[in-house]
Amino acid sequence: MQLTSKQIREVIKKEKGLSDEEIIPMVEDIKEKYEGLLSDVGADIILSKQLGVDMDLKGSTGAITKISEITQAIDSISLYARVKSIPALKTYKSKDGSDGRIQAVYLQDDTGIIKLNLWQDKADIVKELHLDKNDLVFVKDAGVSQYNDRIELSLRQGGQIIKDPDGVKIPKLKENFVKISELETAPAEPVDIIARITNIYQAKTFTKDDRERLALNFEVSDGIKSIRCVAFDAFAKEISSNFSRGDLVRLSDVTIKEGLYDLELYINWNSTVTKNPITNIKIPELYELTLLDVKDEKISNLEPNTSYRITGTVISINRGPLRAFKCPDCKEKVFLINNEFICEACNKQVNPEINIFSSLDIDDGTGVIRVTIFNQLLEEVFELKKEDLKKELSPDEKDAIYYKAEKKLFGKIIKITGKTRTNDFSNQLEFIANSLELLNT
């Protein structure tokens, strides 16, 4: 690898403790001796040899570097480190208008912390290697750059990340594992949690400081107690797109805060959210969790914002739009026109996010309540696939979907777990389902 004059001098200064004022006259003497037939790089190489500085070692990608030793003077480095955190994948628009992706990974060794950027296809390395907090890695051939006065790394073309390299000992990073059911007050420090997702609600947009942001609420349980979780922006998009009810998750370096009614969990920009982590901690499956900590109740006794299990007869399947499309960039409504998805806010064709939903009315003899079903649960109950609805639907096709659902559900007794809420438009109590079981077929 050919180093620049500046890079060579930085290595000489570090190795020999010399200043620029001391090095420049030595280089000028060497250039004068060769009567103008030597470049700055050539003169610096000769000086390094005279001083006994091994530039081959310092400049090669095979040289193993500690994080504290990384400077812009080194063109490319390799290092051993532990994964400290893996923020959510971010997307962006390139200057040419194409979509771009960047996945950051923060690395730590016994000398410091540094950010490694994985651009475009290299962003997939995190999922391909199932990287998680505290994994030991060998990073080979990473370029060095500076951003906002901080040194950062980017994996080069041909560079590699090797998980669990042999013969390397780097102490594990501190982990602060807690159980949701054992939390009585909010811990002062960030914590790590293993739990199972029991509910994911629809992401919502809001404006703060003239910036549009995305927020997502979801719930997780350790088998004894549940906690409400809040994620923003990139993490909100990542969880709503790639995680489902029933997924086992590890939430690392998250913050617990006092909420209005109970403790709440907040995912930070430097948290790590891992799907189906390798762990010895046993968390009940989703079907078991839905039976825990939920009270059986009659419809006439239901109160707002409370989880219940109710049993009743389906007296109607309500026909509605069935699906809604949202722009992945601006989060505004997307219109399906001639099998093309158009975002009027962005004034372009997009590949939209899709949410599916429908509702049933059930009667238990004490009252009637509307039950709303979303996404994954609706796929199971209506026996359809969300992606199959990402197209123009003729009236006959929509009728066929509802006819099939009515044949399966109308007049049947069902048991549902979920949570009550007051509808903002009708001001009526409704039930948001997270599980549904047919008791007679």
Image (cartoon, rainbow, N blue to C red):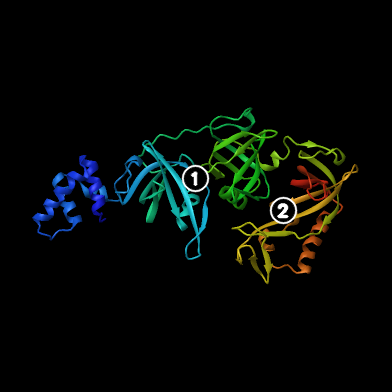
* Quadrant hosting residue 392: bottom right
Q: Residue at x 75, y 69 (%)?
A: 394
The kind of residue on which mark 2 rests is: Glu
Whole-percent x, y for residue 84 in the image: 46, 40
Specify whether residue 238 is in view.
yes
How far apart are labels 2 and 1 at the CA level?
Answer: 32 Å
The kind of residue on which mark 1 rests is: Ile
Quadrant of the rendering where the N terminus is positioned: bottom left
Task: Mark 2 and mark 1 in contact? Answer it, CB < 8 Å.
Answer: no
Task: Give the residue pinned by disc 1.
Answer: 86
Position of residue 78 in the picture relative to residue 34 (left or right): right
Viewer-nearest residue: 388 or 43: 43
Residue extending farthest bottom:
338
Position of residue 279 in the picture relative to residue 388 (left or right): left
Specify whether residue 441 is in view.
no
Q: Residue at x 75, y 56 (%)?
A: 382
Q: Is residue 50 above or below residue 322?
A: above
Q: Which is more foreground, mark 2 or mark 1?
A: 1
Viewer-nearest residue: 4 or 278: 4
Q: Residues within 10 Å of mark 2 (few under 14, many from 20)?
A: few
Task: Give the residue pinned by disc 2.
Answer: 380
Viewer-nearest residue: 367 or 91: 91
